[in-house]
Amino acid sequence: MTMSRNLRKFGAAAALAVATTVAAPAFAAPAQAAELPYGQDVSNYQPTHDWAASGADFGIVKATEGLDFKDKTFARHWKELDKHDVVRGAYHFGHPANDPVAEADFFLSVVGGQPAKKGDLLALDLETSDGKPVAHVNRWAKTFMERVKDRTGVTPLFYSGYAFADQYGKGLSEYPLWVAHYGKAKGTVGTPADWKTWTIHQYSDSPVDQNVSSLSVDQLRALGRP
């Protein structure tokens, strides 16, 4: 993930703990982390990422940020993920200072400009308050994700650091949680706010953002486009 369009989130992400969960108790994390599906997420900071050699079962790539930033490598990553039969997803880096509906529509316009298929995941990456109070950020996230769900039929993943999600994520547990927590061994992360379980745990950013999912590959696809 990226903290902004110009700055890679390495040190800041380590300080934030990001958590991912799904609302259904049936999707509790398996006991053996070694058996969890493995995934990676990238952006324009990894323009030539080799998905064929990645070993990833799923990949989530940056599409947009704010109201006007389009990731220039999105189309390439999107195509490569499909080519190598990796469960794919697109994420938007949100800015609560802007109109959430406008940001959601911008995100969907860019994603919609690429071929879609059943099982494609969508996600909101929310790591900044833009100086706005908790209640504002919480409403912003709800509005953004409701807009995405209404327009696509997809319940988007919610990505954030553990501490950020715990502070701003009340009432968002219907959205599957993607949590970044580098201080926890893969698959051992807890859950913030109202979430009862996580869906994806981002456990490292070296040499690329690395993740595991509590869901099987088929269950991940079931969260995506119908």
Image: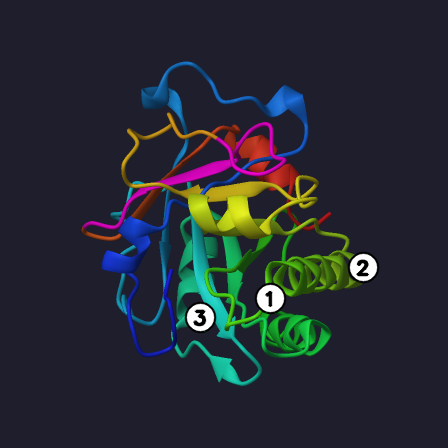
Q: Dot 3 corresponds to which residue?
A: 74
Residue 159: horizontal and vertical position, in percent? 50, 51
If you read the primary sequence from the N terminus, does the residue marked by circle 2 or circle 3 appear first? 3
Q: Which mark is residue 129?
A: none
Q: Dot 1 corresponds to which residue?
A: 115
For badge 1, the amino acid type reads: Pro
Q: Is residue 9 above or below residue 23?
A: below
For badge 3, the amino acid type reads: Phe
Question: Mark 3: few, some, or many residues within 10 Å (few <14, many ≥20)?
Answer: many
Q: Is residue 205 magenta?
A: yes
Q: Nearer the viewer, mark 2 or mark 1?
A: 2
Magenta segment boundaries in residue numbering: 191-206
10 or 75: which is nearer to us? 10
Image quadrant holding the N terminus, namely bottom left
Label 2: which secondary element: helix
Label 3: which secondary element: helix
5 or 57: which is nearer to us? 5
